[in-house]
Amino acid sequence: MGIDTRGIVEAERTKLPDDGVEYAPTPYETFFHAMKSVPADLLAGTFVDYGAGKGRVLVLATRYYNFRRIVGVEISAELCRLAELNLKTAAASRAQIICCDAALYHPPEDAKVFFLFNPFFGQTMKMVVQNIRTSILHNPRRVAVVVCGARNFNAAIAGQDWLIEKDSGKVTFSSPRWHVFLTRAEFEHAPSDLHSKTA
Ligand SMILES: C[S@@+](CC[C@H](N)C(=O)[O-])C[C@H]1O[C@@H](n2cnc3c(N)ncnc32)[C@H](O)[C@@H]1O
């Protein structure tokens, strides 16, 4: 594909907040393996990669799926610049990188797939989960949240009732485990829709 997304970039170099995780690219096989568990009707609308790094996942989501828009949220200006270059090289014109703290990003109303490859934990993860939930309450819909490094995510959704784990897996013994969560049925429609369906 001609892109350069390899290598680890240490947290000190990118000046991450204390709960940020350093850049390491999502393994290609892990991305495709996990995405197979996302229901086909969700492979449209906007795809959001939290902690987009050098843009590997953005390029893959653009090249292999029909999302209308692909958004990467990345806090490091240096990594954003490298991601821009990779998007240009890959002619990924449906993808864009937004340089900001993920905790402050409010997803668009048509976001259907949220991808998190171990980007952060703690308060940032809590705020991101809260912002996704708020987006769904404002605009009820079915979404998938694809997570690697689910320990952080599970802590953030503990006690919440809007997501259910659909599937999880690993490509090889040593590769990271992925999990796919889906919205529970009650969060997929506005209450009035449910009434009119049952009336
Ligand atoms: C493990 S990498 C994810 C790799 C990427 N998704 C890919 O395409 O392969 C984690 C990324 O999250 C970013 N990050 C950490 N804290 C962040 C925050 N609060 N807001 C946005 N990005 C953050 C890091 O700079 C790093 O690039």
Image (tube, grey):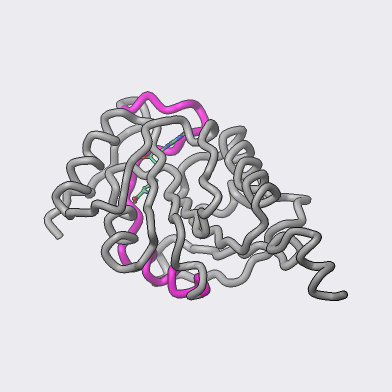
Image-quarter location of ligand 1:
top left
Taking depth in this image into account, of 85 and 31 the one nearest to the observer is 85
Q: Is residue 37 magenta?
A: yes
Rendered position, 113 above or below 88: below
The C terminus lies in quadrant: bottom right
In which quarter of the view is residue 162 placed? bottom right
Q: Residue at x 51, y 67 (%)?
A: 42
The reply to whether residue 147 is in sight is no
Q: Residue at x 60, y 36 (%)?
A: 122
The N terminus lies in quadrant: bottom left
Q: Main secondary structure of the magenta part?
A: loop
In which quarter of the view is residue 36 placed? bottom left
Residue 159 screen position, x and y as percent = 78, 51
Q: Does residue 95 appear left or right of residue 182 in this picture?
A: left
Taking depth in this image into account, of 115 and 87 the one nearest to the observer is 87
The reply to whether residue 74 is in sight is yes
Tell me the magenta residue range.
14-39
Q: Is residue 32 magenta?
A: yes
